[in-house]
Amino acid sequence: MVVIGASQREGSVGNTVVRNLQKAGYAGEIVAVNRHYDHVEDVRCVNRVSDVDGTIDLAVICTPAKSAPGLVEECGEVGVRGVVILSAGFRETGEDGRELERRLLAVAKRYPNMRVIGPNSLGIISTHSGLNASFADTSPRRGHIALLTQSGALGTAMLDWAEKEGVGFSHFVSLGNLIDVTIADLIDFLAEDPHTESIVMYIESIADARSFMSAARAFARQKPIIAYKSGRFATTARAAALHTGAMVGIDAVYDAAFARAGVVRVEEFDDLIHCAELLAHHKPPRGARLAVVSNAGSAGVMVADAVLQKKCKLAEFSEDTTVELYKTQHDGDSALVADLSGERQRSGLDGKDPCEQLIENTPAHLLKNNDEGAGRCTGVVNPVDLFGDATPQRYSRAVQTVLQDEGVDAAIVVLTPQALTDATGIADALVESARHISKPILAVWMGGQRVRQGATRLAQAGIPVYDTPAKAVRAFSYLYRYSKNREVLQETPRTMPIEFHRDRAALRESFASLMLSESELLSESNSKALLEAYGIATTRPIVASHADEAVRYAQQVGFPVAVKVFSPDIVHKTEVGGVILNVADADGVRAAFDEIQKRCQTRRPDADFRGVTVQPMVVDPYGRELLIGARRDPVFGAVMLVGAGGVDAELLQDRSLELPPLNERLARRMLERLQCWPVLGEYRGRPPVDMDQLLSVLLRFSYLLADHPEIVELDVNPLLVTPERTIALDANIVIDLDMPNDGTTSPDRSPQFPHLAIRPYPDEYVRRCRLADGTQFILRPIAPEDEPKWREMLATCSEESIRLRFRYLLQCSNHDLAARFCFTDYERELAIVAETHRDGKTEIAGVGRLVTDSNHEKAEFAVLVADPWQERGLGSLLTDECLTICDGWGIRTVTAEVDPRNHRMLQMFAHRGFTRDLTDEDDILVSKQL
């Protein structure tokens, strides 16, 4: 590697980089580039990059910004593979710097085989390779956390803090201005790195949202990513026109995106590293039910408060746990708890609540005030108070008891240093207990010098320990959030067939004329027409330019009616008094027309009043009002929202965000996150809403957003949801007049759906075909909903077929394993299933799978045909289909691993021009250049 701008001047960037490389023990050759020196820190120095003999793997540029474009050009000419630019003075300095950065980027693009980190980077560190190519003033120890930061200053602060805490890193990358190598590129690299168990990121902004989402989702399925995003309260660059826009802030979109990608977002900067270690080394909990064990009631209450504030749950103990805890609390009062179970049997009280029995038989002086209605005695509710004289044995027994309860997912153990407290002994007892327990344990050792040794023992044993209850609960909330995020990444949705009267390509084309409107704001009538085309029921408005016309239309649709202002300049009709409901007769319609016109002239004299709309009044005593909407975010594209609706929607701020496309589970989770979620079920005598119909509307809304990138904002408020139907009562759409819409799609890898951060289901690869024997199939991409059919297919395969495909005997009943094959990221992976109907049932007969590298240059192919369908040409059909797709993607090389015993497969590949690249006793690697 070379250091361009290396210097003998102590404290300079060039000198610090050379010293750091030497200190880290870099084993490769280091060459300095500076025409003023023969040597820098005993490192040979040359005049220019072209004077270096051999291939240069990495060049670090430490010179002033203006020299960077020329130096990158030199690096490209001699075949340098990687460049890290430490120089500052680019777009962060103003227009001149932006122009310099554009020149730098233009040079870098001329050399596609050379990758560039920076500029304005602090450098890179790879501890397991002995590489510290940075000007940080500390060299971190080896570890398993990779740190990516968009702030060099905060990066050095984290390195310094980690050194103090004894935390190590696998890699450190200061991202700089990200002109070439992106966050997604680095996540993909770290996914393959055996030394990296988790990623920590400090993020200020994301440029390529789709690449980031794709890489993060792939990584988070196996290992945790923890992110701190600054700028939580940045305002949007463009004022929102609709309710949805006002309710969708930039930070809320990042929250939704991180959750969808499986990234855990921390709230405090100092949580980053601790959270990474916690998530990397502790099994995620099954749920959010926490048991709290403490030697002080006040400390337990503090934890309980924090638990509820973080929307976790205090576990409810079983009767057996309650009895055992009571015995543990009073382990010194043998007369009180002796042979409790025997006494219950003798008294015939086996069916009675054991705590009620304990209350009846416990001396009054041992009872404190408590909620006897709950049937629980003091100290055996959650939080568990072990009292100030709690011994190590009492702690150990209590912790093991609560964690053996099926209703408990994790425990927080709190210690306060009281007169009789053995903080170190209790820590040792907790360490011993943890060896026999698989559920997470978090410790809170409150205090200073008296608890320090015990806290150290816990940390050394791998038990996370904190000095305050709030920190411990916050850490558990991250652990639980990681568990939920991973669950979402692998959760099998219920199949909900969504049918349209016309195919979606025809829908896009037919509504292209609407998008050519002269106004950004579509009329309510046109907005609802688009909703109806996607199967979302609406109340269609009829435009009336004068009062008599309004009366005539009202008589046609039937009273009562709703009368609303019709103006291209008025979005929020209620704000100008432009909505009058429950109009019962013709006189009322005339009066409503005149009143609305008068209000508009008073409150919005600048608006173009074109009359009113008349539509049937929909009233249902069991109806609930929701809002569904969308907004185009500048980073993540289309963002979907559902929330409490009506005129108070912005005030209530009860909303849930998600990135389209949706499936049934994602749509349901959106609803479950709402505070008004309980109201949608059976509530205070009202029957539940038709949940399937509501979910169907959300899915149809998601399709609409995917098909129409020109939509900037979309508002359906209110969406009336009843036990019988879901209907849009009002709708507004704002469009981008500058975005072309030709309604076309292409099957290649050119950016499709550029307004979506997650690529939707690629229905362009769905087609019908038949085998030589006449059997008809549908070839289509696999979907998460296919998991049950995929398992059924595997169940029809012999052990030999499974071994030849997977190299081991795969268990088809394992959901986590099945999810790996059915939950595909269509941005980088595609599995084509052959689906057919037999004996009145739909089944999957075979699967061909393509997995590409991050650059979409190479693809790995594999195929499996179920035993009943083998030797009928289906494997060849799937192979040819996948090769055609690769050709359309621009893939250069297709590879496949084949078991040497699989002669039919080897023959099939040979007939298609594959050549053998590598052969051993276990595998034959074949490849084909396209």
Image (spheres, helix red, strand yellow):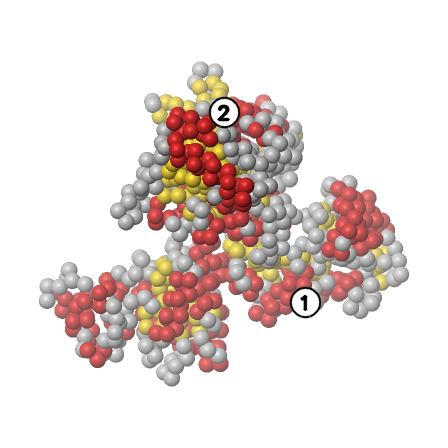
Would you call the spot at circle 2 few (<14 residues within 10 Å), some (14-19), or many (20 or more)? few
Q: Is residue 466 left or right of residue 722?
A: right
Nearer mark to the viewer, of 1 and 2: 2
Q: Position of residue 187 (x, y in %)?
A: 60, 49
Find residue 202 and report its image quarter. Answer: bottom right
- Tell me the amino acid under the disc marked 2: Asp
Residue extending farthest to the right is 36
Q: Quadrant of the N terminus?
A: bottom right
Q: Is residue 238 visible?
A: yes
User: Disc 1 on helix, strand or loop?
Assistant: loop
Nearer to me, 310 or 842:
310
Find residue 45 and report its image quarter. Answer: bottom right
Relative to 720, is 450 above or below?
Answer: below
Q: Quadrant of the C terminus?
A: top right
Alpha carbon distance from label 1 to label 2: 60 Å
Q: Which residue is mark 1?
A: 138
Q: Which residue is mark 2?
A: 503
Relative to 253, is 18 above or below?
Answer: below
Q: Is residue 523 left or right of residue 818?
A: right
